[in-house]
Amino acid sequence: MSRLSLTVPVLVGAALLTLAGCGDDGGGSAAADGKVAVVASTNVWGSVVRAVGGDEVSVESLIDDAAGDPHAHPDKPEDAAALADADLAVYNGGGYDEFFTKLADSTGADLRRIDAFAVSGLPDGENEHVWYDLPTVRKVADETAAQLAAIDPAHKDVFAANADRFGARLDDLAAKAEQVGRSKPGAKVVATEPVAHYLLEAAGLTDATPAEFSEAVEEETDPPVAAVVRTTDLITDKQVVALVNNAQTETAITDSLTDAAKTAGVPVVTVTETLPEGVTDYVEWMTKQLDALAAALSKA
């Protein structure tokens, strides 16, 4: 999945040397500010941790860029340093952010971890984009509260209350997803990549994308020509109500699909893998994507 250009041990060694030279100069460690130091693989999971930890945590997301790609994340000594100094690591798992798990494994530290895919309870091989699965996000929030309480027992009640409030907001979000789907129950959509699979499922929509197309995209290979043709036909023949486009993995093929959708008058719903620029709240992000989906369905 990820492609390490430097060996991880070299990175970790450089990072630990950097830490040794920092001393107690307030360089962002948990000891320096009294907060629990959490490192997340992406800003999506970082936002969930912030919702639960509030002012008692310091969160660093290694991918904090609206265009970031965990499959091609560059090796950074500062990432190793952050993990070496962390109290808790939160990541997606399921093969999605392998750069993070390899780096965490190589620090040699006895690091508390939350693997969202493992927490989800989904079997191996299922769609790994579990940050779009609201029940999984709630499980991760609850597990985060438990882990933070173990690290910082004095604020156990704060973490539990924050997780409950966040969970209530997720319940509202799930209700909104169901409401969006009621206007066109079972309506078909095509997706350039099955990133928002669980959200579409929550809305009761059907992903009609040919399996060969989706599987090739997931494997980062070009889809078979026949699969591309079938996918395009679904759009040009208006057999679907929307094209769901992952803006962070645009290729010549996905561009051709969005062009076909615009020509055919099929709405394009943009989704992303990380929080867009200027957005820090998970629920706000998901709400905007559901609003875009509702707008697309209203035009069908």
Image (cartoon, grey):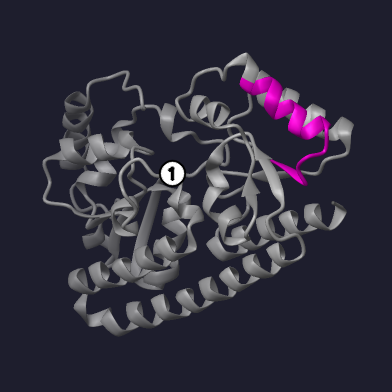
- Number of labelled discs? 1
Q: Could you tell whether 189 is left or right of 259 in the image?
A: left
Q: Residue at x 23, y 74 (%)?
A: 149
Q: Amino acid at mark 1?
A: Asn
Q: Residue at x 84, y 51 (%)?
A: 300
Image position, residue 124 (x, y; %): 30, 44
Q: Quadrant of residue 271?
A: top right
Front-most of 181 and 32?
181
Residue 228 painted magenta: yes
Identify the residue position indicated by label 1 in the image.
Answer: 127
What stretch of residues is rendered in magenta? 227-244
Image position, residue 18 (x, y; %): 22, 36
Relative to residue 27, is residue 175 depicted above or below?
A: below
Q: Could you tell whether 95 is left or right of 252 in the image?
A: left
Front-most of 258 and 274?
258
Image position, residue 57 (x, y; %): 34, 66
Residue 9 painted magenta: no
Image position, residue 212 (x, y; %): 54, 26
Residue 143 visible somewhere in the drawing: yes
Front-most of 265 and 270?
265
Residue 245 visible somewhere in the drawing: no
